[in-house]
Amino acid sequence: MHIMYFTEQPMSTYPREAGRDAGNTALMISNEHFDPVDGSRLYNERLREYILCEEVGFDGIMLNEHHNAPFCMQAKTNVFASILAAVTDRVKIVPLGNPLPLSENPVRIAEELAMIDMISGGRLVSGIVRGGGTEQLAAGVNPAYNRERFIEAHDLIVKTWTQPGPFRWEGKHYQNRIVNPWTTPLQKPHPRIWVPGVASRETTEWAAQHRYPYICLNTTLEATQKIWEVYDEAANEVGYEPGPENRGYLLRVHVQDTEEKALEGAAEFNWMMGEFTGLAHPVWSSPAGYSSPQHRRALVEIANNRRPSPRGGAAPSLDTQIETMQIIAGTPDQVVEKLRVVMEGTRPGIFAIWGNDGSVSHEDSKRCIELLGKEVLPAVREIADELELNSPFDVDAPVSLEHSAPATIATAAAGGA
Amino acid sequence: MTTANAGTDSSTIDVAGVPLSYESSGEGPVMALLPHETGSMGAGELQRLLAENHRVAAPTLPGWDGTPRHEWMGSVRDMAVLMNLTLDKRDAGPINLVGLGFGAWIAAEMATMNQDRIAHLILVNPMGLQPNDGEIMDQFLLGHEAYLQAGYHDLDRMAAHYSDGQPSVDELVEQDENREMTARIAWKPYMFSQTLAQLLTEVRIPTRVLISSHDQIVPPSCGQQYVDAMPNATLGRIDDAGHFAAIEQPAALAQAITEFCAT
């Protein structure tokens, strides 16, 4: 099993009453509430926590990016990925991921990731995402072409990584007359590509068709199992039998020395009106053309107050989330017991632990990470071995259906080509 | 293909491989009526009044109101070319061309390319130019019903327009579909062209620009900018109306259009 640490990197000093007053906590809430002095401190605290993750035994560090919202201070996932490439030695660096449609030049993303891969010595896992609806608006990118841009940008990046330049790309959304970046990744045929998500059937099927692992982001056990059904069916149609190496799962897990303190920290997962991606108008989260047509009617009903929104004040309480194991909190022993249930139910080969959020202090975050690394992770690995939850690295899975040769890291003898 | 219904004929014509639907009514000089980006909703009374003096053709923009779309289409100018091709295919004209809001932008683009087929051009609360003062309202930040409300000066008229006092879910779903089409061809810059103003300086078609007294969606400066750009354009005003003047003041709007076309 591959076990990663994750945090949204929240702007925990953002005044919560500002969100309540504005009625939203994403896209349109004024950045006058951002404090760069706090921002500087928080970025550096997160960096020290990531380094601690490597020291205590995590296999990877999962990163992300969001825009115009205090729930996530990472505006460019490749920035922290670059830093970690230099200051860590062992962990996989896993941006999940680069929101491809937001880019006007995917070749530049290919170049950035190639640099990160080389600086890290081949430790990059390249996650790719469509980006949320608010992200399209924040970047001024047309939501009606989101999926087309995602697929075309992916195709261009993989070709950039795997075929010698110069070549010409004349696509619908991207036209690059000369594709010939000097830098290419250290990993061959290319860095592993993982795809995170929560709901989109099309994205799940697309990931399965490419044999890319799909990472369920804190979905319920029931929803996760349905996603695997969709993934498995699409995988079978293209001729392979998926296993745990194709499945990832992100879960909120907060550990402290006492249950009381753990619950106190876990409550911070609900810090922004219970909306970990920010409270936004439904048409910001799902602008016209962004979502699948099959969801259109429900989204329209919610956007126009014809049916209750599942978000905002309707979010499940902390008690409910703990009861349904959407959040796991407690002492290491208590947490391991529940994690076994989740692992049995979701059978991931890639497990991302979202350890800290909200205003959990730097000291408490570090303690959580230490306990996870020293006491929880060894037990989780034992359970994973017992359940045969192998990661793509454990079984040397092909990086994709298209490139099924064994993955390697280029060496001097191989010419680095 | 043509079907008749209570004095209105519903027809389709194949243009560039996709059927374009339109409704025709009345007798007299031909007039085309191009709708808002919210679709053809609510222009029925205006069309009926205009049909007292004209043969009015009201097309549904392809892709809007549940009709087939052109996958290749990426700009409002593409739509204008398609509409001009439709006029060419019918050998129509010179016609009186009326555009409402977004439809007025399409009509203005058509005029820059096809002056011989247009006798009179009427632009009602036209989008299409970057406002000198203010911004065109961004519907992508508003719920569908809220955006419709912003198009009215008097919300009681909106309530009266819908049988249940508010749009049905089906109508709102259609608004979302129309909004997606709007995104496909008018996303950036949002609701204006950066090249149209200069082209309009060569459009010599007699043009009447009508702006509503209380348009919250398009700033009033846009109407004046059209008049300033075009050599034969004048400005008129529809009182007691918001952006959807065709719904709020159909009689006054029809009168203003009819009188201008008679000149």
Image: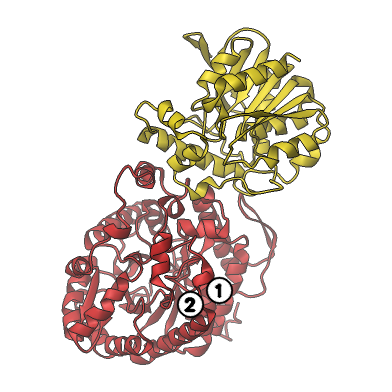
Chain colours: A red, B yellow
- Mark 1 or mark 2: name the one nearer the start of the chain: 1
Q: Nearer the viewer, residue A65 or A73?
A: A73
- Residue B220 locus on image (x, y percent): 66, 40
Can residue A282 be seen here? The reply is: yes
In the picture of the structure, the residue carrying the numbered disc 2 is A124
Say what secondary structure mark 2 lies in: loop
Label 1, label 2: how far apart the Cα atoms are: 8 Å
Residue in view at x 54 percent, y 60 percent: A138
- Residue A361 locus on image (x, y percent): 36, 85
- Residue A354 locus on image (x, y percent): 33, 75
Query: In this rendering, would A63 be left or right of B213?
Result: left
Residue in view at x 38 percent, y 58 percent: A208
Q: Amino acid at mark 1?
A: Leu
Compared with A308, B97 (above or below) is above
Quadrant holding the C terminus of chain B: top right
User: Which of the 4 image quarters holds residue A139?
Assistant: bottom right
Q: Amino acid at mark 2?
A: Leu
In the picture of the structure, the residue carrying the numbered disc 1 is A113
Is there a contact, CB below 8 Å, between mark 1 and mark 2? Answer: yes
Can residue A228 be seen here? The reply is: no
Query: In this rendering, would B253 be left or right of A24?
Result: right
User: Which of the 4 image quarters holds residue A195?
Assistant: bottom left
Residue that protrudes farthest toward the front in the picture: B240
Q: Label 2: chain?
A: A
- How many residues crowd around disc 2 within 10 Å: few (fewer than 14), some, or many (20 or more)? many
